[in-house]
Image (cartoon, rainbow, N blue to C red):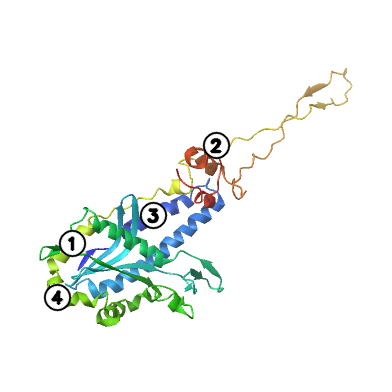
């Protein structure tokens, strides 16, 4: 059963707003590069989520024993989680799926550290999707333990959902695994999207009997398709979409900032001598020379000393509580704790 589809319109709106920011003449070049990078990330992530949603829907959207929720954002106790896909069955086995797409490849070393791989085989450290998904699972556990959602009951007993993680890597992305993958917890949960159905079937046919097979020992533990649908709809109703303020995100003002140039001290007055003529000499006329234009005062990041634009500086000055009167570039702003 397909309960909630992807919200593609929200991503398209974000892309339209970001492309509009690129057209502003007063946005500095390095900020535009950051915007372009964000656009590429959104486009890549959207394609990865759409591919994963296609495979999930192909097998489960019309299955009466499964409920499918895509693109679910939850807020619990001041924390939030953006969950790409949820699959829920009639035993309340819930698969929390995080989809990832990289143009070239993704790798994991023997310490469980993830990195992306570009066309030149260069590595760049990235956040672990396993740990990211574990946070999503923890937030779901907190939600189910609260009173925000009513859990199904059987024989008067409240059912407790079981949460399982799957990291769905795009089929076109190569996965570089460590030689000794037994040292990395949950590495077997990192799979290609096309392996999703086989992975779930493997779970239910004895690969993890201590976690799953016990659910089949009693029909009394299985809820009806109608109850499953009702529970999934209640969960999807808690979706809290986020509207991103991209101008604020990149420190861009609504109008072109006025830059005040500090003029240097006027130079000494220049004397203009009169041209020689046959007429009686007139007294020399003196007038001050026009002030020489000077470069604007350089604004730079307090952390990395990189030059910043006036609108970025104004953004920092307008947020005294967070930046304490100092100026930080876009990259360093993320490392300054909010108060």
- Residue 288 at least partly seen: yes
Badges 3 and 4: C-beta atoms under 8 Å apart?
no
Return the residue nearer the eye: 300 or 176.
176
> Which numbered disc, 1 or 2, marks the residue closer to the eye?
1
Residue 258 bears which disc, if any?
2
Q: What element carries label 1?
A: helix
Query: Where is 259 relative to 92, above or below?
Result: above
Upstream in sequence: badge 3 or badge 4:
3
Left/right of residue 223 with respect to residue 146 in the rendered view: left
Which residue corresponds to the image point at 32% horizontal and 76% vertical from the top-left?
196
Spatial CA distance of label 2 from label 4 is 72 Å
Spatial CA distance of label 3 from label 1 is 31 Å
Query: Where is 71 relative to 216, above or below?
Result: above
Which residue corresponds to the image point at 67% horizontal and 32% vertical from the top-left?
263
Q: Is mark 2 on a helix, strand or loop?
A: loop
Upstream in sequence: badge 3 or badge 2:
3
Query: Where is 188 relative to 86, above or below?
Result: below
Upstream in sequence: badge 1 or badge 2:
1
Mark 4 sits on what residue?
Answer: 218
Mark 1 sits on what residue?
Answer: 231
């Amino acid at each position: 059963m397909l309960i909630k589809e992807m919200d593609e319109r929200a991503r398209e709106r974000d892309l339209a707003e970001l492309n509009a920011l690129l057209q502003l003449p007063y946005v500095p070049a390095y900020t535009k590069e950051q915007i372009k990078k964000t656009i590429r990330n959104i486009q890549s992530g959207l394609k990865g989520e759409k591919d994963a949603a296609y495979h999930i829907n192909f097998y489960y959207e019309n299955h009466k024993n499964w409920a499918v929720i895509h693109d679910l954002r939850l807020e619990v106790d001041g924390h939030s989680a953006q969950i790409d896909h949820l699959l829920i069955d009639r035993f309340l086995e819930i698969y929390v799926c995080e989809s990832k797409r990289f143009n070239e490849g993704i790798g994991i070393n023997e310490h469980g550290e993830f990195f992306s791989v570009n066309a030149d085989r260069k590595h760049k450290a990235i956040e672990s999707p396993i740990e990211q998904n574990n946070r999503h699972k923890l937030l779901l556990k907190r939600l189910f333990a609260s009173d925000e959602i009513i859990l199904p009951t059987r024989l008067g007993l409240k059912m407790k959902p079981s949460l399982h993680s799957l990291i769905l890597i795009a089929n076109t992305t190569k996965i570089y695994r460590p030689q000794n993958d037994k040292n990395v917890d949950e590495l077997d949960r990192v799979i290609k999207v096309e392996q999703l159905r086989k992975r779930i079937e493997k779970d239910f046919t004895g690969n993890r009997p201590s976690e799953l097979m016990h659910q089949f020992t009693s029909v009394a533990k299985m809820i009806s398709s109608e109850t499953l649908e009702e529970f999934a709809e209640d969960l999807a109703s808690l979706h809290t979409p986020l509207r991103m303020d991209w101008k604020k995100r990149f420190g861009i003002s609504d109008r072109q900032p006025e830059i005040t140039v500090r003029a240097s001290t006027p130079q000494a007055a220049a004397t203009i001598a009169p041209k020689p003529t046959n007429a009686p000499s007139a007294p020399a006329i003196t007038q001050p020379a026009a002030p020489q234009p000077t470069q604007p005062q350089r604004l730079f990041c307090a952390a990395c000393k990189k030059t910043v634009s006036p609108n970025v500086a104004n953004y920092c000055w307008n947020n005294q509580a967070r930046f304490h009167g100092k100026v930080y570039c876009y990259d360093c702003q993320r490392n300054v704790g909010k108060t």
